[in-house]
Amino acid sequence: MSQQEAILNIGVSQNNQQQGEYYPLAIGNSWAYTGESSISMEGSESYCISINEKRTIVGKEELFDREYILEKQEIAQSGRDEIITYWIRYRQDRAGLYEADVAASDPPGEDRYIIRLSDDNLDLNCDRWTVLWQNFANGLNIIDNDAIERARILHFNKISAINELLGRKANSALLSSGPPGGILPDEIQRLRYPLRPRQEWIIRDIPLFYSFVESHEVLNLPAGRMSGFKIRIYNELLDDDDIVCLWYGRRGFLGMYVHLETEMYDSEGNSYGAIISDEDLFLDSYNLVKQEKDIEKPGHGKNVQTNGSNLSVR
């Protein structure tokens, strides 16, 4: 996936800064996404899984004596009949968009979401990577099983961290407090308003995740042309060559790109090369009950093209 440095900066309009209304959380709103996950290594075959995801605002739920908007996420993967379902609890005010820091795998109404899950609990979103890794490792022309296993542990630690960032793996530590701006105990901060380039905030303290708004862009998505903010995510486990980018706009979550690299070494420190995993997900279609007030104007944007199920930003 090509990540060009040249972007179209169009600034932040007054409409984009309407406090407490940036992210569309009306019940009935829905979004559909397509994407792909892949693992590869130079000189080896690339293994891919296509993804189709649907997100729907289905209602409300009361947690921690406050009200949250409930989003249902349904994920289908190629080669797998089971639909993975997650539940995200959103709260929004004039200072930002927040999520209840609970296990997204727990459906509404369950008492167990109050207890933080440990890192040993089931991480459903890692299943696809386990399948990809097994195929990938079997196809390697490397006899050093210890080197393969060391690389697998390091790479899956990164993948697990990204799943936790996305709310698909619960954090085991309580947040006693958060940065100023509206966040409350037992929450993580997804967005901080008003969004603008170079804005930054802490998503969670332990493990440390923080966001940096790189730019305001215009994207030509499968769902149409729309503007949004490109947000780069940083974490203590990620290396310089690792990339985690999310895009948000007034139509909601627009897309995601994750690129992870892990060097595979033998016992003497000699490198076999880098293991590379890529994951992308971009908005394919949407239906908003309350249409946004600002209409996109004609012009050039950043293309997001498809090649089969493989999406790329150009």
Image (cartoon, grey):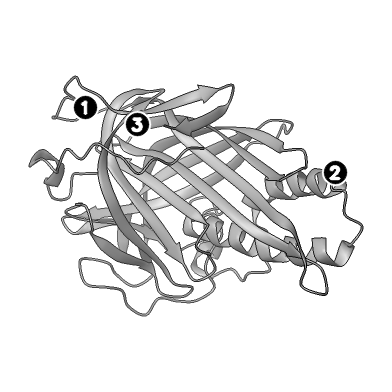
Q: Amino acid at mark 2?
A: Gly
Taking 59 as reference, is 300 above or below it? above
The kind of residue tagged 3 is Gly
Location of residue 224 in the rendering, given as x and y in whole percent from the top left corner: 33, 22
Q: Secondary structure at mark 2?
A: loop
Rendered image: mark on residue 291:
1
Quadrant hosting residue 16: top left
Along the line of sight, which residue is nearer the eye, 250 or 91?
250
Pointer 2 or 1: first along the chain: 2
Q: Is residue 266 above or below residue 110?
A: below
**What is the C-alpha distance between the residues marked 3 and 2?**
45 Å
Q: Secondary structure at mark 3?
A: loop
Pinpoint residue 200: horizontal percent, then vertical percent.
Answer: 27, 63
Q: Is the Cβ of the residue at disc 3 closer than 8 Å to that at disc 2?
A: no
The residues bearing labels 3 and 1 have C-alpha atoms spaced at a distance of 12 Å
Give the numbered dot on residue 28. Answer: 3
Provide the residue designation for mark 2: 139
Tell me residue 14's x, y (percent). Answer: 7, 42
